[in-house]
Image (cartoon, grey):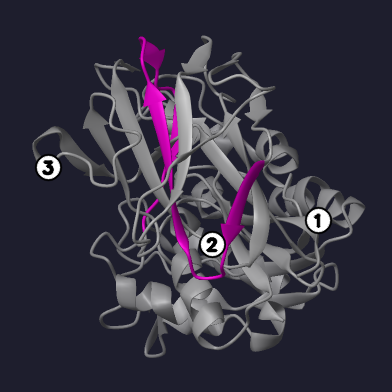
Amino acid sequence: MNNTKWAACWGNATSITDRKESVYAKDITLRYPIRMCFNGSKIRMRFSNLTGTEDVTLTRVLVAIKGKDSYEPIQALFGGNESVTIAPGKEVESDEVAISITAGDTIDVSIYLGNYTQMNAGTLITGPLSKGQYSYGDFATQATLPLDLTRNTNWFYFLNTVDILTDEKNHALVCYGDSITAQSWPDYLALRAWNEGHRNVSIIRRAVSGTRILRQYDCITYAAYGLKGATRFPIELNVAGATAVIIQHGINDIIHPVGSDVNPFRPWSDMPTLEDMIKGTENIYVSHARKLGLKVYSGTLLPIYGWRTYNEERDAFREKFNAWLRTSDIFDACIDFDKAVLDPNHPAAFAPGFDSGDHLHPSEKAYEAMANEVPSWVLE
């Protein structure tokens, strides 16, 4: 096996976690099962405190392959040390971990946090491949976490990327966006790629719920809505082996402004023009992706009929922006997610069975339809 290239096998964005009453944890084990899509002989992991305001110390990080006859966790080191402290706004990478990975394996990444730790750097993601756990206590070496001390979680804290030393032919496809992409369609795309025999591509999710291209919220009420595009994109495009990016982003720029008389954090001055949206996409996203040598695929914005801030003007804006996404020659192609999920008899709305119920986010069935809309040649 000729493993000479580092390629991301799993990836997530890092954002500000939802600010609830409690923002600290102590003596807790986080466990994240990560499906590995490539063969490889080593891995390395990136951990992020990008949005933290205090040092974060990872007491111990272990990696183990699930489903083996024996559970054999391997200690990940950081500059030869067992623990690592990540300064606010920084990321760290583990030393290389020698571990024989077969494509299709699932590894457990277990993080033990011994002392009080600010849990302010993480992202909520969902989907069939995105299921974490946490336990009260130090159980990082155990194959099975104790049932009475463990709960499931979709908050992925600190763990940002898993790279694998693999064959030169393997590469990464980045899915960039907001809550639509933080939810299930990238997982369904990864499963589809595997099932259809596209074994040389990984699907790397870089998505944060609530994010906008042009603005961000600097208040604790909406802090979890994440960083604006100009801040996020250069950080999140740090993906080993990436060859292309699908960008499905912008609906929050259109639906969030309601006027400061209704919500002091959502003034009408935040409402962009079509020109603003186009220039933002060109200057923030496409230009940077081209500098990295990536192919860039646009993804159309989904129906919003029935959403709480829906009106005909916002929907007309969405349609105009979608028209540009479909026809602009700055992209290598357009993936028409809107067409995949809309009701042909009422194009402003989701097709029957495709609405999650809030009239903004798709159902699981619709997320599968979005994944199926990606052309096969994008996965090659």
In the rendered image of this protein, does residue 262 appear above or below residue 333?
above
In the rendered image of this protein, does residue 285 appear above or below residue 324?
above
Residue to which mark 3 is pinned? 147
Q: CA distance from mark 1 to mark 3?
A: 47 Å
The disc, 2 or 3, on the residue closer to the chain's N-terminal end is: 2
Tag shown at residue 360: none
Q: Residues within 10 Å of mark 2 (few under 14, many from 20)?
A: many
Element on which disc 3 rests: helix
* Residue at (39, 55) in percent of width and height: 130
4 inside magenta stretch: no
Question: Closest to the observer: 111 or 271?
Answer: 111
Of the 4 image quadrants, the one containing the C terminus is bottom right
Between circles 1 and 3, the one closer to the viewer is 3
Q: Which residues are magenta?
A: 97-126
Of the 4 image quadrants, the one containing the N terminus is bottom right
* Residue at (71, 86) in percent of width and height: 377
In the rendered image of this protein, does residue 345 appear above or below residue 74?
below
x and y percent of residue 328 in the render?
80, 72
Residue to which mark 1 is pinned? 286
Q: Is residue 7 left or right of residue 375?
A: right
The disc, 1 or 2, on the residue closer to the chain's N-terminal end is: 2
x and y percent of residue 323 in the render?
67, 74
Q: CA distance from mark 2 to mark 3?
A: 26 Å
Q: Please tell me whether the stretch drawn in magenta is mainly helix, strand or loop.
A: strand
